[in-house]
């Protein structure tokens, strides 16, 4: 997935529906960047207004540590919904 200018990653609606994440507000997400797996904990899944797609922001400390920049690409390996 491509990282947008605002440091967010879009999860398409068809993937959200397939994984049953429509009601999830937070998740643990495992991404891969330059061959390194990175686990993001307690990430808020931001809703779009008219679709089931979600976006999440990669935290600044993670971006700075791994050198992740806007328009780079990451691979999403796992999305684990959190119950709160």
Image (tube, rainbow, N blue to C red):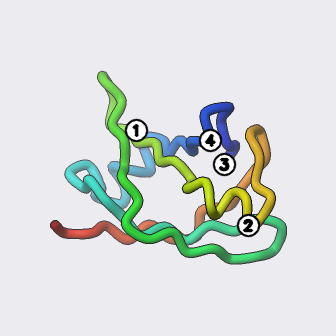
Q: Position of residue 50 (x, y in %)?
A: 30, 22
Would you name the residue on which mark 1 appears? 53
Mark 4 or 3: in front is 4
Q: Do the numbered discs 1 and 4 sit on residues whose CB atoms are within 8 Å?
A: no
Q: Quadrant of residue 74?
A: bottom right
Q: Position of residue 78 (x, y in %)?
A: 50, 71
Marks 2/3: CA distance? Answer: 19 Å
Q: Earlier in the sequence, mark 1 or mark 2?
A: 1
Q: Earlier in the sequence, mark 3 or mark 1?
A: 3
- The structure residue drawn at horizontal position 73% and vertical position 59%, both measured from the top left corner, is 64
Return the residue found at the far left: 84
Q: Quadrant of residue 36?
A: bottom right
Secondary structure beneath label 2? helix
Return the residue found at the far top: 50
Q: Earlier in the sequence, mark 4 or mark 3?
A: 3
Secondary structure beneath label 1? loop
Would you name the residue on which mark 4 appears? 7
Marks 1/4: CA distance? Answer: 16 Å
Closer-to-camera residue (16/39):
39
Marks 4/2: CA distance? Answer: 14 Å
- The structure residue drawn at horizontal position 36% and vertical position 30%, both measured from the top left corner, is 48
Q: Position of residue 20 (x, y in %)?
A: 28, 58
Marks 3/1: CA distance? Answer: 13 Å
Circle 4 Cα neighbour tier, 10 Å, few/some/many (<14 / 14–19 / ≥20):
some
Would you name the residue on which mark 2 appears? 65
């Amino acid at each position: 997935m491509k990282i947008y200018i605002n440091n967010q990653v879009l999860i398409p609606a068809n993937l959200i529906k397939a994984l049953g994440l429509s009601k999830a507000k937070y998740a643990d997400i495992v991404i891969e960047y330059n061959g390194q797996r990175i686990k993001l904990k307690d990430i808020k899944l931001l809703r779009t207004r008219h679709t089931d797609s979600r976006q999440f922001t990669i935290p600044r400390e993670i971006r700075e540590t791994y050198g992740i920049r806007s328009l780079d690409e990451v691979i999403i390996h796992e999305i684990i919904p959190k119950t709160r």
